Structure formats: C-alpha cells, structure tokens
Amino acid sequence: LGSPKQNLKILLVDDFEMVRMMLRNTLIDLGFSDIHEAEDGRAALTMIKTAEINGTPFKMVFCDWSMPEMTGIEVLEYMRSQPKFKTVPFVMVTAEAEQDCVVRAIRAGANEYLIKPISAESLQKKITKILGKETAKAA
Amino acid sequence: MGEKRLSIELGERLAKEIDCGVHATFGNMFGLKPSMQPFQVQKECSVQGDISGILSLMQEKSEGTFIVSFPKETIFKVLEKMYRKPFSSIDQSVKSGVGELTNIIYGVMKANLNKDGFSFKMAVPNVVVGENHTIITINSGSTMVVPFTTDLGNFSVLITFHQIAYQQAA
C-alpha cells in the first residue's frame, strides 16, 4: 500500500506537451506518482471511462480549456452530466484569466481554476484545498 | 474596470505589460528572471530568430501581430529545465513549447490590459521555424521590439499594429 498521495490517480489533459511535463514534474516533486496524460478532451474521456470500467478510476483531473477535438469545458460538462464522474475533482487549467471564463468554469462544475503560467506553489495550494474538502466530505 | 479603450501606443505601457507576461511565464515555469532591455520602435516589422511563436492581436479597432522569437540555443536551454533532457534539434517538443510560451505570455499581457478597459481576444499561436529566419508583416505600422536577456540566452518579443482605416468605415 502506498501513501494517500501515491494512490491518488491523476489525469493531466493538455494539447501542449510542455504543460503536461510541467504539471507532471511538479506533482512528482509534491509526492504524487500515479500520473497519466491525455493530449485532448476526447482522449481524456476515453481514458476516464476505461479507468472507471477497470475499477481504477481517476481521483483528480487537471484539464486545459482550449484544445482541439474537445475543449476542457466540454469534458467538464460531460463529466458533470454523468453520475459516475459527477464528483471527480476537476481543475480547469488555462491561460484565460478573464473573470467571465472563471465564472463559466465554476458554474459548469470545476472545483478549482488554475491560470497559466502555473507555479508549483499555486498548484500545491489548489491540491491541498481539494484534498482538504474531500477529506472533510468523507469524515 | 476602467473606461473602454480602443487602441494602445507602442511605448512604455505596452513594454511594461510584455515584461510582466515574460516575467510571470519564465519565473513560474522555469525559475528564470529575464531582464528587459530598452525597447525600440522600428518602421518595419523584421525579426531574426530560429523559431518564433506568432499570434494575432485583435480588439475593437486595432489589429496586430504578437511575436516571441528565440535563437535555438536559448530555447533548447530553457526547455531543458522543464524536460530534464538536452535538446539538439528543433523537434515537435520545441515547436509545441514555443507555441505555448507565446500563448501564456500573451495571456498574462492580455489579462492585464483587459482589466484596464481593453478587449483583446483569445488567439491561437502559430510557430515558424527556420535558421535565422525573417518574419515580415504586411500592412503593418511601426513595430516595437523588446529584447530580453536571461542566464540561458537572449530572445525578443515584438508587437506590431496594422494600419487599418477604421475611421472611414465608421
């Protein structure tokens, strides 16, 4: 059995490899190890559904907003429409800092909103906040 | 939010927002502190680099081009910090990295300007590759060139606004 961090299965979704790499490196530095990647929204949903069927669901999703094939907001809306994925913590990651984008993502069901360029500190804060809420819910 | 603004001069204010975007991006992502050098406003948009990210600047009554241009030696060293492996050629990772860096720097600059009444739109970057290539924009006005130095090498950010006769259509 690993630590809670090692057991937290995380999906990183971004069409830019550099951003996935940055998130992965930072999460590894923070102690997470079960990290998976998808290049676009459609591939992400396939991975999310497959993991659920296999009994090893994702416990947290970091997803870019602007992507080809399927945007982050479309991934989020689909997940929130499905009982199985309704409560999976979802962090929208985007270069869009405008207030109306933040509001739209939160209304669609995002737990947190992370604005690029991401720092290790901001990423850690968001994860701590989400995990704190999840622990409180479970208690 | 301040009053609605339709255009911005190529000058100190814009250079400050570019500097802000570059600092946030390179600081947060790579732990670098780029140093902005004195900017120049030139009559022609002409940049020389090995790889450049380019996107369209669009807002009410002004259109332009935003370019971030790197010598290959600089971008290789910058991306090595992220990928934790050396680069020796401009591969897909480098192209993708320059596109996303351009996008993120522009995102920070856009957010700051839009808080102040501007309305710059989202834009998708393109990447141009070619050793010591030159980019020339058509129908452009003057171009502001903002050079940066870092411990890992130099690069430049350029902005040009196109000369469009909006007043005739009003």
Image (cartoon, coloured by chain):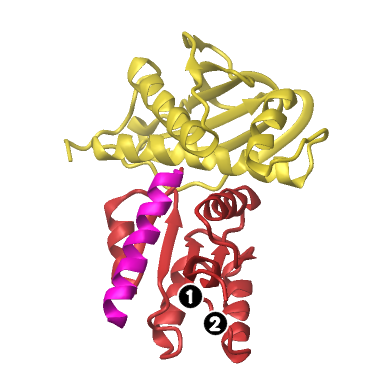
Chain colours: A red, B yellow
Question: Residue A128, image x and y in percent?
Answer: 36, 60
Q: Are marks 1 and 2 on the same chain?
A: yes
Q: Name the residue that disc number 1 marks.
A: A59
Q: CA distance from mark 1 to mark 2?
A: 6 Å
Asked if B95 appears above or below A130 in the picture, the reply is above
SS for tag 1?
loop
SS for tag 2?
loop
- Residue appearing at x 40%, y 20% in the figure: B15
- Residue appearing at x 49%, y 41% in the figure: B104
Q: Quadrant of residue A24?
A: bottom right
A89 or A41, nearer to the observer: A89
The amino acid pointed to by label 1 is: Lys
As drawn, the residue found furthest toward the left would be B2
Asked whether the beta carbons under mark 1 and mark 2 sit within 8 Å of each other, the answer is: yes
Q: Name the residue that disc number 2 marks.
A: A57
User: In the rendered image, is residue A5 in sight?
Assistant: yes
Asked if A131 appears above or below A137 in the picture, the reply is above
B32 or B168, nearer to the observer: B32
Region rendered in magenta: A118-139
The amino acid pointed to by label 2 is: Pro
Chain letter of mark 2 equals: A
Chain letter of mark 1 equals: A
